[in-house]
Amino acid sequence: MTQQTPLHARHVELGARLVDFGGWDMPLQYGSQLEEHHAVRRDAGMFDVSHMRAVDIEGPRAEEFLRRLLANDVARLSERGKALYSCMLNEAGGVIDDLIVYFLEPGRYRLVVNAGTADSDLAWIGRQAGPLGVALRPRGDLAMIAVQGPNARARAAGLLPAADEARALALGPFFGGPLSILDGNVFVARTGYTGEDGFEIMLPAEHAVALWDRLLGAGVRPCGLGARDTLRLEAGMNLYGNDMDATTTPLESGLAWTVAFGAGRDFVGRAALEAQRAAGVPRKLVGLLLEDKGILRSHQKVHAGAAGDGETTSGSYSPTLERSIALARVPAATGAGVEVEIRGKRLRARVVRPPFVRHGRAQIAL
Amino acid sequence: MSENIPAELRYTKSHEWVRRNPDGTLTVGITDHAQHALGDLVFAETPEAGRTVATGEACAVVESVKAASDVYAPLAGTILEGNGGLADAPEKINTDPYGEGWLWKLKPADGKELDALLDAGAYGRFLAESAE
């Protein structure tokens, strides 16, 4: 049975085309996916991301627990509200999920995990947490709206009373914090999945519709999962399930930078990653820019000459670049150019280092 | 929504249209209903001149941002020309599906096959029934 977020009726009223995403009935687009994409790059757009799951981790040993659970090191979160992006690994070093973790206060952290993996993530975290006496509190009571774009923060914060507006605008990148409205139950984070500045706003589900309507009134454009995918791909951000999964390590997924190998911290999967590093990581995740005409998609074969073959993991048309781009897992020795097989033809693509676009501008030579 | 279905064309249930040209050749494209359902098109691959196609054969591909869709030959024959103007402007299929968004021109194998296709009224009824 497909689940619905508190904003479902609004999506229907706005004429959204709905699709099943990870068991949730979500808006793919409201009109033109291209226009929604451009609205985020040029102005402000908003996404209902209430299908994602916030989980609060509480207890005196919460930091110790998360330092063991996650591949990135929460000890880096020295200030309240600071957040980081991390993978959560299994013992073989494979990625169970990618997530953002916020340090709320000593003994309390918030994880935000993907919708499709939320249930299995919770089961895994629960099993790991048992011995350390930390409490897991899934926050299904919270809805989440992401407001993204160069004008997003100003539009969203402008709806708040003066003190909260100042609080929101004072947040540095990758910081979050509670507001005073709604008894302190609104949490605003300066994070996102688009490569633009903006907020992700977590609030009690019963207030989600009111916030959505006020953002609409402020001229923020509703955007669906279609635009979300082209935006994150342009930003070089991985999509769990496509670009990595439980059979791939962060080292083969362009995510080595998210793994903190500092001395004295054992974490689940560390030994497996160190073994892979010592033996030489056989594959890498790269960006591709298609040079011949066509559209890159996932699961297309990549020919890297003498280095061997690989496969695209995500692909699409880039509305900002007006070219087709992809992420691909290829042999480590792959050079500057490859061929991608599309409908039996080999098309030329250039290997590039993501991101493709940041803050509205191309980051690669076209 | 009210559909745009020109009266002088013929149609298929897979949403292709066919126009009979004065010189007996045919022009083929996808309908307004189809372009609307597909969304913004960003790439089109049309068949090469000289290729022989059978009725129902997939002979073109149109790609929206999200997905690729096959376009099927409503009638058998020899391809005379694929619409090269779509290479740089695939969005013409969205903005002018019955005009500049044409996909290919065909020399039909059998001039009478066209009459077996749906006329505008029948295609309109088919769309109405499918929407229920």
Image: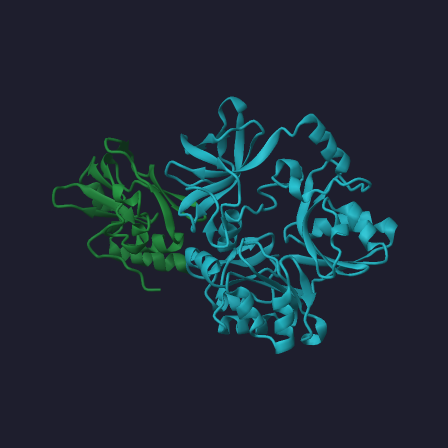
Chain colours: A cyan, B green
Q: Is residue B117 left or right of residue A118?
A: left
What's the residue at 37%, 38% (across, down)?
A293
In the rendered image, the vertical position of residue A288 relative to residue A211, given as above or below: above
What's the residue at 71%, 72% (across, down)?
A184
Query: Where residue A286 sits: x, y (%)?
Result: 54, 37
What's the residue at 70%, 70% (across, down)?
A185
Q: Nearer the viewer, residue A254 or A97?
A: A254
Q: Is residue A45 left or right of residue A366?
A: right
Residue B118 shows up from this direction: yes
Q: Residue furthest left?
A: B23
Q: Residue furthest top?
A: A306
State which quarter of the image contains the N terminus of chain A: bottom right
Residue B83 shows up from this direction: no
Query: Where residue A250 sits: x, y (%)?
Result: 66, 39
Query: Where residue A280 sits: x, y (%)?
Result: 66, 27
Query: Where residue A161 sits: x, y (%)?
Result: 61, 78
Q: Nearer the viewer, residue A283 or A359?
A: A359
Q: Is residue A263 left or right of residue A224?
A: right
